[in-house]
């Protein structure tokens, strides 16, 4: 599910509601049957969150960052081979995973974030403008990765400004304005808005 809307429309606030960062003034946000406010701990166990900027420790490699993050999150102790497998599944080669993260591009940092979600075996993936600042090739690669996760049964909610990406990978598109979900459309309908048919006289 992709959320589209101008700045200030409520996309980030919506993701924060599901994460329990923000308390709803009315209604509730539920994830896998759990209330995001009262069952905050259980919700966080099912969700992986990828913000627009992934913060890594520059002096450490991507592998070392992933090892640290999984330990910090309380995961079972993972062997390096398992961590490398998650990083490769996220699109980061073993050679790149062993390089210092201080030299990573934004796209490479995002892949470490996806690898963390894979290691967590999250049932729900929340993404907040994950492709902002990426070049077109990296955006397409990231989109294919999210599609693969969806095919594996991971429910995905992505807030984005990228209409083309939303029409490419979304199964449903929510249009937001002023904190309200105005309507939900299909990716086909969004594609028609982006590429209207041209008639020839």
Image (cartoon, rainbow, N blue to C red):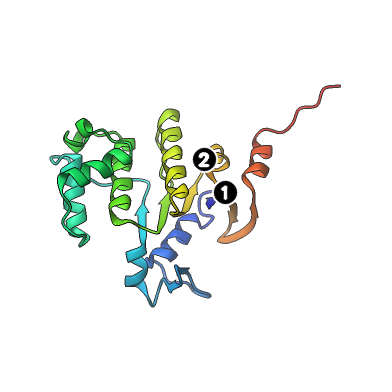
The residue lying toward the viewer, choosing from 63 and 18, is 63
Question: Which residue reaches farthest top?
Answer: 201
List the residue tagged with mark 1: 171
Residue 20, percent from left and from top: 38, 68
Residue 53, percent from left and from top: 33, 45
Q: Residue at x 36, y 63 (%)?
A: 46
Q: Residue at x 56, y 37 (%)?
A: 164
Q: Eyeballing the image, is 8 above or below 190?
A: below
Residue 24, percent from left and from top: 47, 72
Question: Which residue reaches farthest bottom?
Answer: 38
Describe residue 103's horizontal placement relative to residue 28 as left or right. Answer: left
Check the picture and name the quadrant holding the C terminus: top right
List the residue tagged with mark 2: 162
Describe residue 80's horizontal placement relative to residue 45 as left or right. Answer: left
The residue lying toward the viewer, choosing from 8 and 75, is 75
Task: Name the mark nearer the viewer: 1 or 2.
Answer: 1
Residue 184, percent from left and from top: 63, 55
The residue lying toward the viewer, choosing from 152 and 185, is 152
The mark found on residue 119 in the picture is none
Q: How many other residues sit within 10 Å of disc 1, few (<14), some (14-19) or many (≥20)?
A: some
Describe residue 20's horizontal placement relative to residue 181 as left or right. Answer: left
Residues marked 1 and 2 touching at CB (< 8 Å)? no
Describe residue 171's horizontal placement relative to residue 90 as left or right. Answer: right
Element carrying mark 2: loop
Q: Eyeballing the image, is 124 above or below 66?
A: below
Inspect this view and state whether residue 34 appears: yes
Compute the Cα span from label 1 to label 2. 15 Å
Inspect this view and state whether residue 57 appears: no
């Amino acid at each position: 599910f992709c959320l589209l809307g101008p700045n200030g429309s409520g996309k980030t606030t919506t993701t924060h509601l599901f994460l329990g960062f923000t308390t709803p003034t009315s209604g509730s946000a539920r994830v896998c049957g759990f209330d995001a406010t009262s069952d905050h701990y259980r919700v966080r166990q099912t969700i992986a969150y990828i913000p627009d900027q992934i913060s890594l420790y520059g002096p450490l490699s991507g592998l070392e960052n992933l090892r640290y993050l999984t330990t910090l999150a309380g995961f079972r102790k993972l062997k390096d081979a398992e961590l490398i497998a998650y990083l490769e599944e996220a699109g980061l080669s073993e050679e790149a995973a062993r390089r210092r993260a201080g030299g990573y591009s934004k796209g490479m940092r995002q892949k470490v974030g996806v690898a963390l979600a894979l290691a967590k075996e999250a049932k729900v993936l929340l993404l907040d403008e994950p492709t902002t600042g990426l070049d077109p090739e990296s955006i397409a690669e990231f989109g294919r990765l999210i599609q693969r996760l969806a095919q594996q049964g991971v429910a995905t909610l992505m807030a984005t400004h990228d209409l083309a990406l939303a029409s490419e990978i979304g199964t449903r598109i929510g249009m937001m304005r002023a904190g309200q979900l105005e309507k939900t459309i299909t990716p086909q309908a969004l594609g028609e808005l982006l590429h209207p048919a041209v008639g020839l006289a």
